[in-house]
Image (cartoon, rainbow, N blue to C red):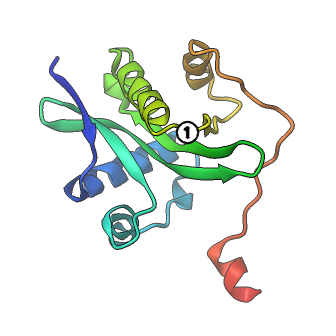
Amino acid sequence: MDLNIRIAVANDCPRILELVNELALYEKAPQEVTVNLNHFVDAGFGENPVWKAFVAVVDKKIVGFALFYTRYSTWKGCRLYLEDFIVTEDMRGKGIGKVLFEKVIEEAKSDKYTGMVWQVLDWNEPAINFYNKYAAHLESGWLNAALSQEQVKAF
């Protein structure tokens, strides 16, 4: 297997969005993906990019990605926030996720972030087991909160 981990470029966005939809389907929330390709590309590669990503490429095909950005904590300072991390189902168990995840850890270290944070669904045992290999601290007691675009507009 010829694995290459590299920084994402704008031309990768259609494939990354396919994987976003694969992840949303796995997480039982495909209807929640409402971003369109133009917005996605602009948010990553426009005038004011807000995210970066690494892609995992095998035989010239993107089989995984890790998308991240800076999150500021008033308690901890600048933290790398891992928004999405996925390896396609048919490529899992081959060590691709390990290499990809460790590339993100290296990014957090080299950019001198005060840590790295992400979310994992409490029922996603394969992901939890993966993160436990890194002795990750899995918090309890916090609930996610959000307002939709419609709710914000209606305010």
Going by the numbered disc 1, the residue's amino acid type is Tyr
Residue at figure coordinates x 47%, y 46% from the top left:
68
Place of residue 136 in the rendered image (x, y in percent of width and height, measured from the top left): 65, 21
Count of numbered tags: 1
Closer to the camera in the image, 21 or 42: 42
Residue labelled with disc 1:
113
Quarter location, residue 87: top left
Closer to the camera in the image, 139 or 104: 104
Residue at figure coordinates x 34%, y 67% from the top left:
37
Above or below residue 128? Residue 146 is: below
Above or below residue 132? Residue 26 is: below
Seen as rendered, the residue at the extreme bottom is 154
Residue at figure coordinates x 81%, y 47% from the top left:
143
Closer to the camera in the image, 35 or 70: 70
Place of residue 106 in the rendered image (x, y in percent of width and height, measured from the top left): 42, 28
| Image side of residue 88 versus residue 71, left or right | left
Closer to the camera in the image, 113 or 140: 113
Which quadrant is home to the C terminus? bottom right
Place of residue 97 in the rendered image (x, y in percent of width and height, measured from the top left): 40, 24
